[in-house]
C-alpha cells in the first residue's frame, strides 16, 4: 500500500469523523413555554412528520393515522414501520447518525434516559398549554423526571390477576375477588395444584409465577412493603428486610410450596393459556393473543391482590411517544398536533379497540369498561390503575440496573441462591450502576 | 441433525396456539396449511421475494467476481504491502459489528445513500474477507507450474487467471457462491438499518414483523422460515455438484 | 511467487478500496472512542485512559474472556475435527452421499428459532431428552443450561454451536478435497498404504490450507459468539455474569446503556486478543500447513 493512498484515506476518515461529531450538537434548545405558543399562530402550511412505528400497525392502529390525515391534510405523516424486536438497533443507529424520526414509539425502558441525554423533547410546556390534565389518569405524566415530561403515553399496559374459571369451579374453590390479598391467592393456589396423572409431579398448577420485573419479582416485593429502589430512585433497596421477604415469598411459590411451574418449564409451557394453571399475573396486552389462540378458554380478571399491609400495587408498563429534540419547531408543533389528536376521545377510543393497551383518557377508559370481549371485567385494569397504578421504579439507568439484578433474581427464583445471599450481590451491583450514572 | 428442521416444518403446519408443546411433536395433528397462506397475505410476500432476489443476485455476482480477482492477486504475486493487506483482511473480521455499524452508517449517510439498495450491494463488488480468504487458500493448493508454463507461452496474468485458474477453482467458487447466497438472502441487519420505505424491504426483514409486543406468532414465523429456506436448499443441491468436482475429475495432478 | 508486482497490486485494488472506504474510518473512529465518552447523541468527550482502566478492573469482562476462551478451546478443535471427518466420509464413493451432505448442511440454514427450541428441550432439566436418557440408565439428571457451573453451561452451548457450524466447515473442507487426484490415491494404494495412511499422508496435507482457514475462521467466530448464547440463555439482560461473553457485554453497553466508549474499549480489547491468537496461528502455520 503506498503512503499517498493511506494519507488520503486517513484524511477522508478524519474529516468524516469531524462532520459526524460536530453535526451532533443539538440544533435548538428544547422549546420554552413562550416559543411553543408562537408556532401555533402560523397558517396551515405543509409539514411532514416522520413517525417511527415499532411493530407496525399491529401495535399502533392504522385508523388513528388515516383518520388524522383526513382531519389535518396539511400535516403529512410519513410512517416508517420497523419490526418490534429490532427497533432498538435501528433507532439507536439513527439517533447517533443525527437522523432520527420526529416522533416515535419508545419502550418505557429508555424514555427517561433519552430525556436525560437530551434526545427527547420536554413536553411539559405543551401539556400545560394545551391539555386539561384532570381529564386523564395520572399515567399521562409517567415519563416525568425532575419536573420535565419526556413522553406521551402510547398506552398503558397494566397487570391484573387472571384466573381460569373452570379450574376453580371443578375444585369448588370460590373465585377470586378484588379484595383478595396475596395470602388469599397463595391459599387458593395450594388447593388448586393437582397431580392428575399420579406421576408425583403436579400437572395443574394453582399459580404461574412470573420471572420479569412487571409481573414477577417487583409486585411481590411491593406486596410485602419492599421495593427495588428507594423513593428518590437513587438508592438500591433490595436488601431491605421487606424486599427480601417479598422475594422469599415469590421464590417459595416454586421451590417450597410448589404451586407454580419452574421458570424453565414456564418458558415453553404456556400453562395458563393451555388451562394448566389456575391463576397468573396477566398483562393487558396478552389478551390479544390469548383471545386469538384460545377463544374457548373460560377466564376473567380481578385486580392485583392487596399486599400484606392492605395496600395494592398495580404494575404498569407505559410505552411513550417520544418527540425528537432536534426536529424543526414547526415539525414539533405538527407532531404535537398529532399527539393531541391521539389523546382526544376519538384517538383514545381507537386505541382501546386495538386491545394492545389501555388509553389514558378517563372517558375512553369508561367506554372500555362496557366492552364485552374477554376478559369481561376490564375494571380489574381500568380501576386498578386508577387506584394503585405504579410504574416500575423507572429512572434513567433502568435498563442497566435491571440487567445487573435480573440474572441473580433468576438464580433466586430457580432456588440456586437464597434471597438473603442473592440480594447482597444485587444491592452492591445495582448501587454501583446508580452511582455510575449520577 | 434433522430434528430441528422437521420440527420447524411441523410447527409451520400446526394450528396457532397448539405449538411449542413438550416434548415436541414432529407430526402435526391436524395438518394446517393456513399458516402459509396467512404469511403470503400478511407479509408483502411477492414484492419482498423479488427485492431479496435482486439484492442477493447482485451480491452473489459482485462477491464471487471480486473475491476471485483479489484472491488471485494475493496468492500469485509478490508486491509491497501484500502481507499487510492479508492481515488487514483478517482484521476486518475481528472487530464486532456492534462497534463498526454506526460509523459505517455515517459513511452511507454522508454520501446520501440511505434508503437505497447501495449499502446492501455496493460493498460486495469490492470483495469480502471470507471469500478472499477462501479462494486464496484454494489457489494456494493449485499447482504453480501451470502459471509458469502459460507465462512462457506468452499469456498475460489476466488471461492465465480466467483461462486456467478460474475453471480449476470451481469447487471453491461454488462453495463461496452458496455461502454468499445464504448470508445475503438471510441478512436482516443492513436492510433493517438502511431501508425506510416498506416497499423496498427484503423477505427476512418483512418476516420479522410476525413477532411483536403483543404476539409471537410462532406458527407463522416457522412457515415463513420454511419458505425462505426452500431456495437455499435448491442452491445448495445445485452447487454441490460443483464443489465436489475439481481436479479429481480433470485429473491434472498426479 | 511471481514478481509482476504491479499486476498483483491491480488485482487486489478492489479490496484495498474496500479497506480504505469502509474499514478505515470505523476502525479509527472506534479506536478514538475507546478514549472517549459517547452517549450516541451528544458529542464525544475525550477522557483519556478511563475506559481502559475501568475495563481492566471490571470483573465481568474477565469472566467473559474466560468463558469465551473456554468456548473456543472446545468449539474450534471439535468442530474442525467433526467437519474434517464428515468431509472425508462424504467424499467417498458412497450411496446417497449428496443426500447426506444436505442433511449435515441443514443445521447451517435452519434458523435459530427452530434449532434453539429443540436444543432447549434436549437440555431441559425436567422434561429434557438428555436427562430422560440419563435417568433411564439410572444416572441423576443434570442441570445443563441452568447449571451454576459455568463450564457445564458453556460446554453445553459449545455443543449446540458445533451442531450449527460443522456443516459449514464441512463444505469448505470438501471443496479443498477435490484437489486430491484419484491417480495419486491409486498409486499409494498400490504401494500398500491402508486407509489411515492415505488419510494422514495424502488427504491431510492437501486439505491443510482449508483446515487452517476453518480454524482461523472458527476461532474468530467463537470469540464473537452472540446468537447462540442468547438463544440458549434468554435475552441480553438475563445472562448471568458467570455465563457472560464479551459480545453481549458490548451490545449491552453500546445499544442499551449508551456507553459507546466502554463498549469500544471492550471491542478493541477483544480485537487485540483475537489478533494475537491469529498471529500465533499464522506463525505456526508453516509447521503443518502444506502449500504447493
Image: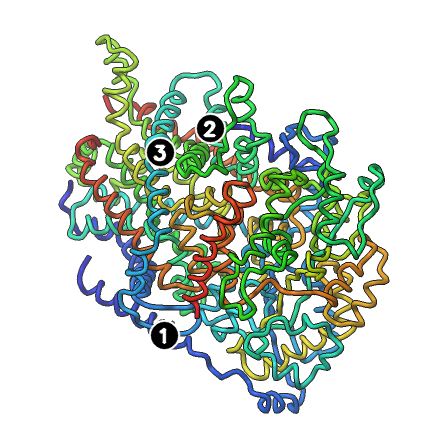
Where does the C terminus of chain B fall, quadrant-wise?
Answer: top left
As drawn, C140 above or below A133: above
Name the residue tied to disc 1.
Answer: A19
Chain letter of disc 3? C
For residue B27, side relative to residue C254 (left or right): right
Residue C104, numbered circle: 2
Q: Is label 2 in contact with label 3 (beta carbons under 8 Å)? A: no
Quote the CA–CA distance across marks 3 and 1.
45 Å
Residue furthest to the left: C3
Question: Residue A401 location in percent, x, y?
Answer: 49, 59
Secondary structure beneath dot 1 equals helix
Residue at position x 42%, y 75% in the image: A24
How far from the left and from the top, in percent, is residue C107? 49, 34
Q: Residue at the spot x=25%, y=27% of the render?
A: C206
Q: How packed is label 2: few (under 14 Cα within 10 Å), some, or many (20 or more)? A: many
Which picture quadrant has residue A314?
bottom right
Viewer-proximal residue among C253 and C271: C253
Mark 2 or mark 3, whichever is nearer to me: 3
Q: Write down the chain letter for disc 1.
A: A
Residue A224, placed above or below residue C160? below
How far across and how far down the image is residue A146, in percent? 54, 77
Residue B180 shows in this picture: yes
Whole-angstrom CA distance, mark 2 to mark 3, is 20 Å
Q: Name the residue under label 3.
A: C74
Crowding at dot 3, Cα within 10 Å, few <14 / some 14-19 / many 20+, comes out as some
Q: Confirm or deny contact between disc 3 and disc 1 (CB under 8 A).
A: no
In depth, the one of C140 and B96 nearer the eye is C140
Amino acid at each position: 500500500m503506498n503512503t499517498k493512498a493511506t494519507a488520503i484515506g486517513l484524511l477522508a476518515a478524519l474529516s468524516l469523523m469531524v462532520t459526524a461529531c460536530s453535526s451532533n450538537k443539538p440544533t435548538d434548545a428544547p422549546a420554552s413555554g413562550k416559543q411553543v405558543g408562537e408556532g401555533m399562530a402560523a397558517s396551515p402550511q405543509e409539514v411532514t412528520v416522520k413517525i417511527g412505528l415499532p411493530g407496525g400497525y399491529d401495535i399502533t392502529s392504522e385508523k388513528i393515522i388515516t383518520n388524522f390525515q383526513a382531519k389535518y391534510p396539511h400535516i403529512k405523516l410519513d410512517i416508517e414501520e420497523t419490526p418490534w424486536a429490532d427497533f432498538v438497533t435501528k433507532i439507536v443507529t439513527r439517533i447517533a447518525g443525527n437522523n432520527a424520526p420526529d416522533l416515535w414509539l419508545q419502550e418505557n425502558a429508555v424514555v427517561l434516559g433519552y430525556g436525560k441525554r437530551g434526545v427527547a423533547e420536554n413536553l411539559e410546556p405543551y401539556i400545560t398549554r394545551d391539555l386539561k390534565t384532570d381529564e386523564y389518569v395520572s399515567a399521562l405524566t409517567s415519563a416525568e423526571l425532575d419536573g420535565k415530561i419526556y413522553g406521551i403515553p402510547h398506552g398503558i399496559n397494566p397487570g391484573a390477576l387472571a384466573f381460569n374459571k373452570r379450574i376453580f369451579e371443578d375444585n369448588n374453590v370460590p373465585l377470586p375477588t378484588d379484595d383478595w390479598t396475596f395470602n388469599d391467592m397463595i391459599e387458593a393456589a395450594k388447593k388448586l395444584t393437582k397431580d392428575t396423572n399420579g406421576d408425583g409431579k403436579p400437572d395443574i398448577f394453582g399459580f404461574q409465577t412470573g420471572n420479569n420485573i412487571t409481573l414477577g419479582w417487583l409486585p411481590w416485593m411491593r406486596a410485602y412493603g419492599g421495593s427495588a429502589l428507594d423513593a428518590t430512585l437513587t438508592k438500591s433497596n433490595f436488601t431491605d428486610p421487606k424486599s427480601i421477604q417479598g422475594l422469599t415469598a415469590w421464590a417459595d411459590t416454586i421451590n417450597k410450596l410448589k404451586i407454580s411451574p419452574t421458570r424453565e418449564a414456564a418458558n415453553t409451557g404456556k400453562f395458563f393459556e393451555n388451562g394448566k394453571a389456575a391463576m397468573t399475573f396477566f398483562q393487558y396486552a396478552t389478551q390479544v393473543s390469548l383471545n386469538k389462540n384460545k377463544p374457548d378458554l373460560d377466564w376473567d380478571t380481578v385486580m392485583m391482590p392487596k399486599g400484606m399491609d392492605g395496600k395494592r400495587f398495580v404494575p404498569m408498563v407505559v410505552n411513550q411517544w417520544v418527540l425528537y429534540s432536534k426536529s424543526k419547531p414547526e415539525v414539533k408543533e405538527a407532531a404535537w398536533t398529532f399527539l393531541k389528536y391521539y389523546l382526544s376521545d376519538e384517538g383514545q377510543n381507537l386505541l382501546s379497540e386495538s386491545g394492545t393497551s389501555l388509553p389514558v383518557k378517563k372517558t375512553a377508559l369508561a367506554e372500555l369498561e362496557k366492552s364485552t370481549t374477554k376478559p369481561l371485567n376490564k375494571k380489574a385494569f381500568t380501576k386498578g390503575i386508577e387506584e394503585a397504578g405504579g410504574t416500575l421504579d423507572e429512572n434513567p439507568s433502568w435498563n442497566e440496573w435491571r440487567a445487573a439484578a435480573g440474572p441473580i433474581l433468576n438464580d433466586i427464583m430457580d432456588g440456586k441462591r437464597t434471597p438473603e445471599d442473592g440480594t447482597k450481590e444485587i444491592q452492591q451491583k445495582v448501587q454501583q450502576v446508580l452511582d455510575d450514572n449520577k | 441433525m434433522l430434528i430441528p428442521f422437521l420440527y420447524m416444518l411441523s410447527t409451520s403446519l400446526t394450528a396457532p396456539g397448539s405449538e411449542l408443546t413438550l416434548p415436541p411433536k414432529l407430526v402435526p395433528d391436524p395438518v394446517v396449511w393456513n399458516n402459509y397462506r396467512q404469511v403470503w397475505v400478511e407479509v408483502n410476500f411477492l414484492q419482498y421475494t423479488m427485492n431479496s432476489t435482486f439484492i442477493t443476485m447482485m451480491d452473489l455476482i459482485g462477491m464471487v467476481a471480486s473475491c476471485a480477482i483479489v484472491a488471485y492477486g494475493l496468492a500469485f504475486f509478490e508486491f509491497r504491502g501484500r502481507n499487510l493487506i492479508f492481515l488487514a483482511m483478517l482484521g476486518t473480521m475481528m472487530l464486532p459489528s456492534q462497534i463498526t455499524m454506526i460509523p459505517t452508517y455515517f459513511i452511507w449517510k454522508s454520501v446520501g445513500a440511505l434508503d437505497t439498495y447501495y449499502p446492501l450491494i455496493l460493498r460486495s463488488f469490492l470483495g469480502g474477507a471470507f471469500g478472499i480468504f477462501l479462494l486464496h487458500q484454494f489457489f494456494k493448493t493449485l499447482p504453480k507450474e501451470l502459471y509458469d508454463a502459460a507465462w512462457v507461452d506468452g499469456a498475460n496474468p489476466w488471461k492465465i487467471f480466467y483461462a486456467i485458474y478460474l475453471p480449476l477453482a470451481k469447487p471453491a467458487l461454488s462453495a463461496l457462491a452458496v455461502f454468499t447466497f445464504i448470508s445475503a438472502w438471510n441478512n436482516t441487519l443492513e436492510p433493517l438499518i438502511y431501508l425506510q420505505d416498506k416497499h423496498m424491504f427484503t423477505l427476512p426483514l418483512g418476516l420479522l414483523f410476525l413477532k411483536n409486543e403483543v404476539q409471537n406468532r410462532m406458527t407463522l414465523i416457522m412457515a415463513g422460515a420454511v419458505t425462505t429456506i426452500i431456495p437455499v436448499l435448491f442452491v445448495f443441491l445445485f452447487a454441490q455438484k460443483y464443489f465436489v468436482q475439481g481436479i479429481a475429475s480433470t485429473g491434472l495432478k498426479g | 511467487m511471481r514478481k509482476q508486482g504491479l499486476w498483483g497490486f491491480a488485482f487486489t485494488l478492489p479490496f484495498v478500496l474496500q479497506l480504505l472506504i469502509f474499514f478505515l474510518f470505523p476502525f479509527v473512529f472506534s479506536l478514538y472512542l475507546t478514549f472517549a465518552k459517547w452517549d450516541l447523541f451528544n458529542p464525544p468527550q475525550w477522557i483519556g485512559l478511563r475506559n481502559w482502566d475501568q475495563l481492566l478492573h471490571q470483573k465481568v469482562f474477565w469472566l467473559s474472556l474466560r468463558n469465551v476462551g473456554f468456548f473456543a478451546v472446545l468449539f474450534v478443535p471439535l468442530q474442525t475435527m467433526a467437519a474434517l471427518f464428515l468431509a472425508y466420509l462424504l467424499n467417498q464413493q458412497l450411496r446417497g452421499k449428496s443426500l447426506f451432505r444436505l442433511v449435515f448442511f441443514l443445521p447451517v440454514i435452519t434458523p435459530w428459532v427452530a434449532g434453539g427450541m429443540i436444543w432447549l428441550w434436549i437440555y431441559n432439566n425436567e422434561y429434557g431428552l438428555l436427562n430422560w436418557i440419563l435417568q433411564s440408565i439410572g444416572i441423576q439428571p443434570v442441570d445443563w443450561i441452568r447449571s451454576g457451573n459455568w463450564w457445564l453451561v458453556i460446554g453445553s452451548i459449545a455443543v449446540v454451536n458445533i451442531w450449527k457450524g460443522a456443516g459449514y466447515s464441512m463444505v469448505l473442507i470438501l471443496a479443498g478435497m477435490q484437489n486430491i487426484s484419484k491417480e495419486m490415491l491409486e498409486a499409494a494404494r498400490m504401494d500398500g498404504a491402508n486407509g489411515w495412511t492415505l488419510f494422514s499422508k495424502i488427504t491431510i496435507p492437501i486439505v491443510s490450507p482449508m483446515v487452517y482457514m476453518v480454524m482461523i475462521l472458527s476461532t474468530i467466530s467463537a470469540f464473537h459468539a452472540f446468537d447462540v448464547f442468547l438463544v440458549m440463555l434468554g435475552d441480553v439482560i438475563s445472562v448471568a455474569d458467570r455465563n457472560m461473553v464479551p459480545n453481549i457485554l458490548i451490545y449491552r453497553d453500546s445499544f442499551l446503556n449508551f456507553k459507546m466508549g466502554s463498549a469500544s474499549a471492550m471491542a478493541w480489547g477483544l480485537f487485540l486478543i483475537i489478533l494475537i491468537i491469529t498471529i500465533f496461528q499464522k506463525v505456526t502455520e508453516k509447521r503443518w500447513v502444506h502449500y504447493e
